[in-house]
Every structure is written in structure tokens, then in C-alpha cells.
Image: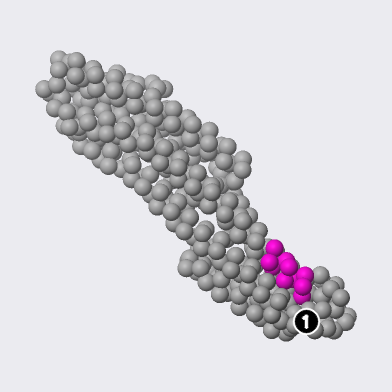
Amino acid sequence: MQGASHGVGRLSTEPVELGVESVCRATACGHPDVAVGLAVLGMTAVLVFVAGAVLTRLDGAREALAREATRTRAERDAFERFRRRVANLESSERGRPMPTGGGTNVLTVPASGAAVGGDGLANARRAYRETIMATAHYEEEYDETLATNVAEEFSAPVASALVEEGGTLTPSLRTTLASGARRASEERTDLLSKLETERSSIEAAESTLAPAVDAGEGVVDLELSRATYTDLVAEYERLEWHEGRVESLLSDRQTRIHDEEGDRRHWFDYLYRSLSSPYPVLSAGAGTLSLIDDAKSALASAACKR
């Protein structure tokens, strides 16, 4: 659960820079003269393949976000259930005097010599196992012992106090567990909001990329050998309009990536760890620009033969 509670690691800029280089190569940084002898039939096969792959990247991003939202929601609810169960321990179990002497850990030594009964600590551990560790994805994503997970979510001293053999659920430890569970639940709520923002960003990207892909595919469906010169020019200008919109999208996305890096390191690596690239919008955008570029080349080749 490190991704939600402790942030994610540093986001490398190298893949972003490589993505920008590929975008630059595919667009305004320099176009070679179109060879008049371009094989339109072979280009058509390439366009169909590229168009089919472009938006699949965004489908994968949506699936990754939905999966992460489901897991985050489950963890948020689990921490809230754990918090309530810890609070119930406070009201349902009677305090008893603790032996004097020993250490001074505020988590294990009760205030005013009072502590929850001997079963309190065992019940707290049971509550943790039956809530946080019982989420459907726990074993797949974390596969940690109770002590390791509590240390990650709360702290090492809290974990040590919770698993201590013969220990006692002191008022201080009980309060620490309840407040820590509330914090963890609130962090998941914040994460869900960020996931929704990213989902909306993916939807907005698709609203730009999908028509651009359709425009590129339209060249495949057009019988270039029979199209008039005017039709070819009109299609070419339409592709250039879409190209400008996609370039603007990628520029905005690049800015957002660096902004997010300042708030949550490795944010996109964390979100899209199941995908081939942590930057699906940049990847899909670069593929769209490549598709448009190839379609423009096919149009130019056909126009040169008029």
C-alpha cells in the first residue's frame, strides 16, 4: 500500500523526452520530400495496422485506472471498518491495571495504569487481518505480513506494539491505530479524486485523438487513384488541422506530466505499471501523428501523379 500512503518514487524524464523526440520526428521538426513512387497499397496496410493500435493504448489506460480505483476504494472502506472496530474495542472491553516497571513506550505503557483487557491486542490484530488484509487484491499486490504492512501504513513502533506477544492494547495504541486508519482512509479518498481527474484527462485525450485517427483511416477508405486533385488537397488540409490539435494535446500533456511529478513522484509509473508505457496519451498521440503523417504522404504521392 506504499503507493497510496507514502507517495510514489521519482518520475524519470527519459521516456518523456524519447516520446517528444518521436513526436517531433513525426511532425513539424522536419518532413522529407515525399517520394513520387510511394506504394499506396503498401501504405494502406500500414495505416490500418497503426490505426487499430493507437486507441487501444487508451483502452488499456482506462482499464488500469478502473482497476486502481476499485482497489483504492476497497482499501479506503477497509481502513474505515478497521477504525470502527478499534473504536468498539474501547467501549466493549474493561480496563485493568498494568504491571509497573519496564520500558516507557507510550504505545505499550498505559496512561494512569489503565489498559484494555488482555484480548484487546489480539482482537485488534484480528480486525486488521479481517479488514485491510482481507481485501481481494491484498495477496496479489502486497503479500505482506501483518507486521510489515502495519509498519508501512502506520509506523515501525506501531507495528512492534501491535504484534508484541503478551502486550496490551493501551489507550495510546488504540488512539494511534484509530487516527492512523482515518488518515489512511482519507488518503485513499484523495487518491480516488486524482484517479477520476486522470480518467477525465484520458477521455478528453480520446475526444481529440479518435477523430484524428478516423481522418487518417479515411485516407485508407478513399480510392486515391480516382480522387480528384481538389479532393486530395482537401483531405490533406483536414489532416493538417487534426495534426495541430494532436500536437497541442501532447504539449499540454507533457506539461501535466512534469506538474504531477512535483506533487507525486513516479505517479504515472505507479498508475500504468501494467502497461508497456507509463505515458499512454503520449504514446497514443505519437502513434496518431505517425498515422496522419503516413496518410499525408499517401495523399501527396497520389497528388503528384495527377
The region drawn magenta spans: 170-179
Identify which residue is drawn at 32% across, 31% down.
212
- The amino acid at mark 1 is Gly
Q: Picture coordinates of residue 109 (x, y %)?
A: 82, 75
In the rendered structure, does residue 57 fall within the stretch colored magenta? no
Residue reaching furthest right? Answer: 101
Location of mark 1 (residue): 95
63 horizontally vs 258: left or right: left
Q: Main secondary structure of the magenta part?
A: helix
How dense is the environment of label 1, judged by Cα within 10 Å: few (below 14), some, or many (20 and up)? some
Q: Nearer the viewer, residue 125 or 155?
A: 125
**Considering only vertical position in the picture, is 141 above or below 6?**
below
Identify which residue is drawn at 27% across, 30% down.
215
Location of the N terminus by quadrant is: bottom right
Q: Picture coordinates of residue 222 (x, y %)?
A: 17, 28
Q: Picture coordinates of residue 123 (x, y %)?
A: 65, 79
In the rendered structure, does residue 176 fall within the stretch colored magenta? yes
Q: Nearer the viewer, residue 94 or 285?
A: 94
